[in-house]
Amino acid sequence: MQTIVFIGSNKSGTSREALTISNEMGYFTVLLTNRKSFIRQMKEFPEVHRIIYVEDLLDKDHILSIIKDLKHEKCQIKAIISFIDPFVAFAGRISQELGLVNLSNDALAIMEGKNLVRKHFKKNPVSPKYTVYHYDESIDEIMKEFDDSFPLVLKSPVSNGSKDVLPVNSTEELKEGLKYLKKRTPNKTVLIEEYLMGPQYLIEVMVVNGEISIIAVIEQDILNGTRFIITGYSYPALLSFDESETLQSAVFSIIQQLELVNGTCHLEMRNVKGQWKLIEMNPRMSGGAMNRIIEEGTGINLVKETIKLFLGLEPVLEKTVMNYVYAKFLTIQSKGKLIKVTGKNRALKYDGVTEVFVKPRKGAILREPQSLGDRYAYVIAVADSSIKAKEIASKAADEIKFYLDPL
């Protein structure tokens, strides 16, 4: 049996889509997971032929032992893949060790650490002003580096997601933010950066044998508050010719300096008064609804083409359609136990709506947004203009109502 082994998956989003696509491509699909709930809910993963619980997904000896057992069962291992941080470079290294495919694993590993990214691009003009703060350092000395100016942004160096990215507007908020991150993560450092003002964009990239392809540039709508919660994605981003040219130049300089020859990544960048600045980058395509957005807009199933890259096959990145797409994500403003959700079918009836997804089930505890995981539904709409796609998605999303039992 030709087999693909996946290291880690979320219950929905691109990592889950990868499992389905692997199965559709005819591969025996094996998921290694550190989530015991997935074992209990195996019936909810019909696309997966086998789910194996692994407490530590970075335990190389254990993973290799599982692969050895699969081979004894006549599984022909064709790829080891992960769409989840921090397992992407790890999966690449195992693939290389097994002689499956050669990815740019050193470059992928750099992208898995925020501190490493900042250090690597320190002299590149895309890098914002930053410092790595050690908990035993004086805050006063750190503030001198930023000329005592606020706002600033605090980031956990290893976490991915908005829950560990905090904007701070005063010394008191800075102290509270550092205290929060110290408690949440066992790291000895925190990344402190200048707060960059300007529109933010997500850029999906694939590199094959050194050839850089920018698959999509998507503008992000960000919810203002204590976290950076993205509530909308608009494809394609409406950039001027000069903006497109300078963005491509910035992205190419990043990829080349990283020495990424084979692999995928996504970057988040802001246009700050005409200067492109790198917010962050990750060694995989973006999660959530990103694959659906890109496929609706371009005809490219980026998850499938990424799997082909890991299989050592030639990805097909030709755009076959050109649509305007908007994805509207929903959050709530109070904590409670979910009683019911209404409006999904009404939202689906809107002309141009291609997908409506509601994540939580009855009885789930919902809360105001603190991370991207606290987005509880989305609506994707396609139209002949960016404004119209956003209008359709927003109106359809208004139909969806969450009924909560307050806590």
Image (spheres, rainbow, N blue to C red):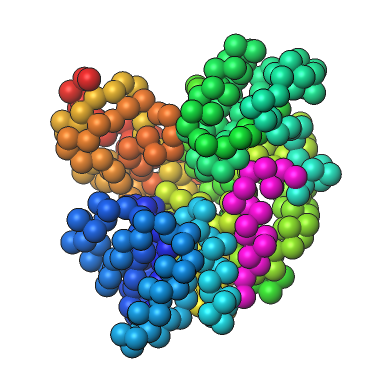
**Is residue 25 a member of the stretch shown in magenta?**
no
- Res 305 visible: no
The reply, left or right, for residue 341 in relation to residue 272 is left
Q: Which of 325 and 57 is in front in this view?
A: 57
Q: How many numbered marks appear? A: 0
Answer left or right for 351 relative to 181.
Answer: left
- Answer above or below: position of 136 versus 188: above
Does 82 sit left or right of 47 as displayed? right
Residue 394 appears in the picture as rendered: yes
User: As displayed, is residue 95 above or below residue 140?
Assistant: below
Tell me which residue sits at (32%, 53%) in the image.
35
Q: In which quarter of the image is the N terminus?
A: bottom left
Q: Give left or right: position of 115 versus 148.
A: left
Image x and y of residue 320, in percent: 52, 67
Q: Name the image quarter holding residue 100.
A: bottom right
- What residue do we see at 50% from left, 53% from top? 85
Q: Residue 213 sits in which quadrant? A: bottom right
Q: Provide the residue span drawn in magenta.
A: 102-119
Residue 333 is situated, as x and y percent measured from the top left of the image, at 34, 22
